[in-house]
Amino acid sequence: MKLALKIMFVIFIIWITAGIYLLKTEHEKAQIVMGFAVFYFSFLFMPFFIYYRYRDGKYKKYILNDEKLMKAFKNQGKD
């Protein structure tokens, strides 16, 4: 899966580079190319990346619950 993410990222970089080149040369389809690049990044690459990063429950350390809040409030007065 890591290899697939790397390949997808390289495709995105090449796509954006081609889009920037088309914008600089004032090609008529440059806006469409850039739009599809943003679409690809937003709806294909990012969800795949987020799933890969947080599939094993790594996100749980970022969720606030009562225990973490109480611990933070107890430590606040000690500074």
Image: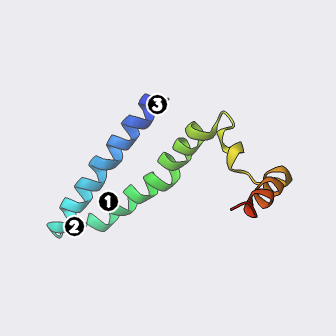
Identify which residue is drawn at 57% across, 45% down. 50
Spatial separation of the CA atoms under disc 2 and disc 3: 31 Å
Confirm or deny contact between disc 3 and disc 1 (CB under 8 A): no
Residue at which label 3 appears = 2
Q: Residues within 10 Å of mark 3 (few under 14, many from 20)?
A: few
Residue 52 in the image: x percent, y percent? 56, 37
The amino acid pointed to by label 1 is: Val
Residue 18, how many percent across, how many down?
A: 23, 54
Q: Mark 2 highlights which residue?
A: 23
The residue that appears at 69% across and 44% down in the rendered structure is 61
Of mark 2 and mark 3, the one earlier in the sequence is 3
Where 59 sits versus 56, above or below? below
Q: Is residue 42 left or right of residue 55?
A: left
CA gap, disc 1 and disc 2: 9 Å
Work out whether mark 3 precedes mark 1 in sequence or the reverse, and give the earlier one. 3
Q: Mark 3 to mark 1: distance in Å?
A: 26 Å
Would you name the residue on which mark 1 appears? 33
Dot 3 lies on which element?
Answer: helix
* Left or right, 26 with reference to 57: left
Going 38% across and 43% down the picture, which residue do you hit? 9
Q: Amino acid at mark 2?
A: Leu
Circle count: 3
Q: Residues within 10 Å of mark 2 (few under 14, many from 20)?
A: some
Residue 25 relative to residue 44: left or right: left
Q: Secondary structure under badge 1?
A: helix
Q: Give whichever of 16, 67 is nearer the camera.
A: 67
The residue under the point 78% across, 51% down is: 68
Judge the density around disc 1: few (<14), some (14-19), many (≥20) Cα neighbours within 10 Å. some
